[in-house]
Amino acid sequence: MTRRFILPLAAALLAAPAAFAQKTYLHCGHLLDVRSGRLLAQQTVVVEKDRIVAVQAGYAAAGPQDKVIDLENRTVLPGLIDCHVHLETVPSRASFAERFTLNPADVAYRAEANALTTLRAGFTTVRDCGGSGINTALRKAVAKGLVPGPRIYSAGTAISSTGGHMDESDGLSDYMIEKLNLGPAEGVANGPVQCQQAVREQFRRGADLIKIASTGGVLDLSKDASGAQYTEEEIRAIVQTARDLGMAVACHAHGAEGIKRAVRAGVTSIEHGSLMDAEAIQLMVKTRTWYVPTIIAGKSVADTARKHPDYFSPVVAAKALSIGPQIQSTFGRAYKAGVRVAFGTDAGVYRHGQNAREFGYMTEAGMPPLEAIRSATLNAAALLDESANFGALEAGKLADVVALDGDPLKDITALMRPRFVMKAGVVYVNN
């Protein structure tokens, strides 16, 4: 054979494996088009490697090298997204003591187990809103395929003022406070300069976003969860520094004044928002600030404090009973006023894997089931600035797929029982 025949033949043989690359065909009895809101019968989602390459009407025939997964008795929708979790933590009477008894390796193994539980519950992407830095390491391990879990966007260590919600020395003796000596590197920052330093520290450590607290919290040992704990100038310094570094800012806030300061300063999202007033709601509508409500967290801590009076310390129990029950009604008012909502649950405050209970609480407060699902797909992807990659079952997007029994538009609790979970083309659950 001459050179002019040999070279093209060699090139064709080298290219042959790509031509016969295996695809996966998902035959879907019903497919929820979250963009149009339509439930489409008999659809095929074609997956190649980690992406969707086609969504077709009917049950498309697969090639001899391809794989078919029968979901003909299921309702299929995009992988769900939880925009507020804490993979390192679990609810426990011993939570305070564990800060002094667990080693980083103990926390890491626990976080890995929580991540797998979350993925199996149908949540293929999460935003971890604050931990020790193990959350960022876990993100890397999942991305490299070393351990199974949802796609993680990590806030690293969250930032607050001295005595604020994320100050780990709250409630300790003066001796322990001196020994800990927490500062910007540990997420405790005061004044614009320290706040800028704290943001840069999290950027250096590999965080994807910045999490701050502009008010106190329920589960910390401070006496008040509603008072503002950062000035608007301090929050503005955080937001501007984060923007310079290409990072969004999520803001834990319960009290109305702390919410308004944060929104005026330009944060990306308000987390919890339990006590927001009408002025704060209108400000969020005007600025298009995202709201991540975490209703399940409020209900969970309130129920625990009510049923088990000795579970929390007295100061925490009082806040749990007064603030926790208010999130659901606040959410209902904010949604009806037009505030943009992204799904989030604060998993870690309650038991991981129960994230989908939030959908029921959202619909109870007046959000239609389709909008609740959109909050965990289209909206959550938009909050993460990842609309091009996930949030809908469309060609070109990552193959994050969940399948259920029943119709979640009629029975929202179906979302609590996923029968099939695929993340980036890999199947993790197939019952």
Image: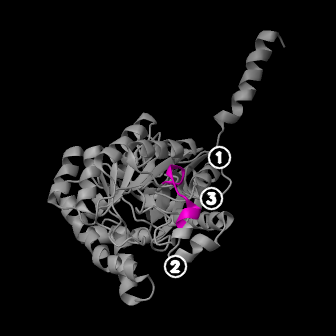
Q: In x, y percent, where is residue 191?
A: 38, 47
Mark toward the start of the polypeptide (1 vs 2): 1
The image quarter in which residue 48 lies: top right
Amino acid type, callout 2: Ser
Amino acid type, callout 3: Pro
Label 1 and label 2: CA atoms lie apart by 52 Å
The image quarter in which residue 279 lies: bottom left
Q: Which residue is mark 1?
A: 64
Tell me the quadrant of the picture where the C terminus can be found. Answer: bottom right
Helix, strand or loop at label 1? It is loop
Q: Is residue 412 something one can see in this rendering?
A: no
Label 2 and label 3: CA atoms lie apart by 25 Å
Q: In x, y percent, where is residue 372?
A: 31, 61
At x 38%, y 52%, the residue is 250
User: How many C-alpha atoms fall within 10 Å of the one at disc 1: few (<14), some, or many (≥20)?
Assistant: few
| Residue that protrudes farthest toward the right in the picture | 1
Q: How is the image coloured?
A: one colour
Q: In x, y percent, where is residue 171?
A: 46, 72
Task: Specify the label residue 92 is tagged with.
Answer: 2
Q: In x, y percent, where is residue 319?
A: 33, 76
Report the magenta residues as a range.
177-187
Task: Specify the label residue 148 is tagged with.
Answer: 3
